[in-house]
Image: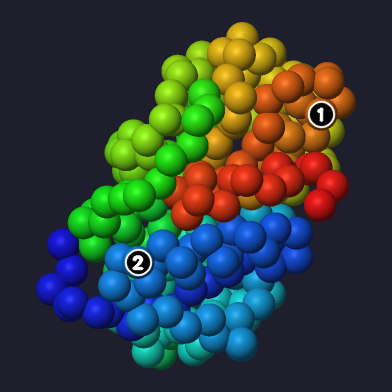
C-alpha cells in the first residue's frame, strides 16, 4: 500500500484513449480521485513509443521514451489505463536506454513507479469500488501485455466483484491473444482475423451482455469482430464500468 495519503499522480492517457475513447480517461481521473490521488494530465505527453519499438525503430522509440520520462518523472506515480503502454514504460524503457549513462537510471526510476490503473488502485491504494450498481452479465478478456508483462489478472476481477448486480461469467481462452497485437494485426491480417474470430466465438458462447478488458486496442479489435457478426455482446473498458460510466454507447457504437 502507498505510504502517502494523497499521492500526486501523472495520468498517461494513451493515444487511443485520447483520440477514440476519452470516456476511459475521464473514468481514470474519477477513480484515482476517489482513491484519494491528486491527478494531473501533463500536456507534454504524446505516444509512449510502443509502435516504433515493436517495429524495430529503436531510435525513435528511445526519443519518445526520453520525452515521456522528462514529462512524468516528477510525479509520485505514473498511471495508465492500458497494460500495453504501461508494460512499455516498465520493461521497454529500461532496455531501450540501458546503455545511456544519463537516461538509464531515470528510465529505471520511472519504471519503478509506473502502474496500470487497476493494479494501482488495488495493490498501491487499497481501493474498493463503492456505490456502483450495474444490472448486467459480463465476461473478461485478459490482454497479453497486462497479463504477461505486469501480472494483472486478479486486480480487475476483484474490483468488478464489488459492483452490485454485475454477474461475471468465465471466458474460455480468457488468457489467449485476441489477435490485435498492435502492428501485428496490420502485418499479419489473415492470422489476426482467424484469432479474433475464435475469440468472438468464445465470447458469444458466454451469452454475456458485456465484454470487459483493460486495453482499448484489444477492445476495438474484438468489438469490430463482434459487430460484424451481429453479436449482442457490447464492449467497455473495465474502468468505465467501475466508474459507473457504462450507460452510454459501447465501444464501436455511434454516440
Q: Quadrant of the N terminus?
A: bottom left
Quick one: 40 or 183, which is closer to the camera? 40
Q: Position of residue 224 (x, y in %)?
A: 80, 34
Instruction: Identify the residue at the far top of this view.
Output: 205
Q: Residue at x 32, y 58 (%)?
A: 121
Identified at 32% across, 59% down, the residue is: 120
Task: For marks 1 and 2, give the one nearer the viewer.
Answer: 2
Which is more N-terminal, label 2 or label 1? Answer: 2
Q: Secondary structure at mark 1?
A: helix
In the image, residue 107 sits, relative to residue 153, either above or below, namely below
Q: Is residue 74 left or right of residue 49?
A: left
Quarter of the image where one finds residue 194: top right
Q: How is the image coloured?
A: rainbow
Q: Nearer the viewer, residue 84 or 209?
A: 209
Q: Secondary structure at mark 2?
A: helix
Residue at figure coordinates x 13%, y 73% from the top left: 3
Residue identifier under label 2? 34
Whether residue 23 appears in this view of the structure is: yes
Mark linked to residue 227: 1
Residue sticking out furthest to the left? 3
Residue toward you, 185 or 9: 9
Side (left or right) of 60 relative to 224:
left
Q: Circle 2: is it few (<14), some (14-19), or many (20+) Cα within 10 Å?
A: some
Residue 205 x, y percent position in the rendering: 61, 9
Q: Is residue 61 left or right of residue 99?
A: right
**Label number found at residue 151:** none
Label pair 1/2, CB-CB below 8 angstroms: no
Label 1, label 2: how far apart the Cα atoms are: 34 Å
Residue at 44% across, 30% down: 166
**Looking at the picture, does residue 42 appear above or below residue 178?**
below
Q: Is residue 152 visible?
A: no
Amino acid at each position: 500500500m502507498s505510504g502517502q495519503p494523497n499521492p500526486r499522480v501523472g495520468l498517461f492517457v494513451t493515444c487511443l484513449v485520447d483520440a477514440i475513447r476519452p470516456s476511459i480517461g475521464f473514468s481514470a481521473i474519477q477513480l484515482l480521485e476517489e482513491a484519494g490521488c491528486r491527478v494531473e494530465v501533463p500536456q507534454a505527453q504524446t505516444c509512449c513509443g510502443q509502435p516504433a519499438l515493436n517495429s524495430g525503430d529503436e531510435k525513435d522509440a528511445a526519443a519518445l521514451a526520453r520525452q515521456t520520462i522528462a514529462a512524468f518523472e516528477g510525479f509520485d506515480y505514473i498511471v495508465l489505463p492500458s497494460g500495453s503502454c504501461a508494460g512499455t514504460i516498465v520493461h521497454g524503457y529500461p532496455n531501450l536506454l540501458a546503455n545511456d549513462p544519463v537516461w538509464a537510471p531515470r528510465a529505471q526510476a520511472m519504471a519503478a513507479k509506473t502502474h496500470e490503473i487497476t493494479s494501482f488502485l488495488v495493490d498501491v491504494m487499497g481501493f474498493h469500488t463503492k456505490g456502483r450498481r450495474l444490472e448486467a452479465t459480463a465476461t473478461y478478456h485478459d490482454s497479453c501485455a497486462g497479463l504477461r508483462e505486469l501480472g494483472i489478472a486478479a486486480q480487475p476481477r476483484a474490483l468488478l466483484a464489488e459492483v452490485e448486480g454485475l454477474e461475471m461469467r468465465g471466458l474460455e481462452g480468457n488468457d489467449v491473444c485476441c489477435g490485435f497485437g498492435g502492428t501485428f494485426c496490420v502485418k499479419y491480417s489473415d492470422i489476426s482475423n482467424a484469432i479474433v474470430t475464435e475469440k468472438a466465438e468464445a465470447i458469444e458462447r458466454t451469452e454475456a451482455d458485456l465484454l470487459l478488458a483493460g486495453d482499448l486496442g484489444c477492445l476495438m479489435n474484438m468489438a469490430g469482430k463482434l459487430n460484424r457478426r451481429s453479436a449482442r455482446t457490447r464492449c467497455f473498458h473495465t474502468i468505465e464500468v467501475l466508474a459507473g460510466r457504462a450507460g452510454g454507447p459501447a465501444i464501436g457504437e455511434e454516440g
